[in-house]
Amino acid sequence: MPTPDRNISALIKLLAEDNPQIVEVARAKLVEMGDKAVPALERTAAEHEDSKVRVEAKGVLERIRLAAVSGRWKEPARHRTYKLGLTSRRARRGSALPGPAPKSAKL
């Protein structure tokens, strides 16, 4: 069974293919590998002799980063809320409506 490093190297080589379907499958597999593929992709994006492969590697890195961020945003918030006993000026004035407090009507 091939090691993950060999799989990553093979997928990076496929980024140079002329067939867009092969390149898209390689991109998807690299994104699926996530953080495991990042070091190799960063080296490729910086050092590869083929500019097409460098651009593809940068695009895959961007996809991995976006997937990581969007995954974090989908998780529920895991923080505690503390009741500090603070009220806004509007609440202290007795206005429950947003905006300035209503002016009293003159008769």
Image (cartoon, helix red, strand yellow):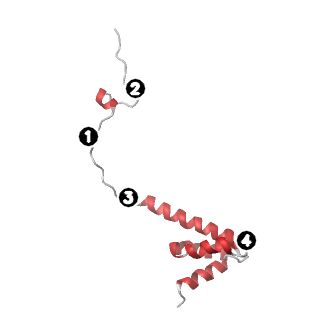
Residue 69 position (above or below residue 34): above
Q: Amino acid at mark 1?
A: Gly
Q: CA distance from mark 1 to mark 4?
A: 59 Å
Q: Is residue 38 visible?
A: yes
Nearer to us of marks 2 and 1 is 1
To which residue does mark 4 refer?
Answer: 51
Q: Earlier in the sequence, mark 4 or mark 2?
A: 4
Dot 1: within a 10 Å radius of its alpha carbon, few (fewer than 14), some, or many (20 or more) residues?
few
To which residue does mark 2 refer?
Answer: 100
Q: Amino acid at mark 3?
A: Pro
- Residue furthest top as drawn: 107
Q: Amino acid at mark 4?
A: Ser
Q: Nearer the viewer, residue 21 or 14?
A: 14
Q: Earlier in the sequence, mark 2 or mark 1?
A: 1
Residue at the spot x=69%, y=73% of the render? 53
To which residue does mark 3 refer?
Answer: 76
To which residue does mark 1 refer?
Answer: 85
Q: CA distance from mark 4 to mark 2?
A: 59 Å
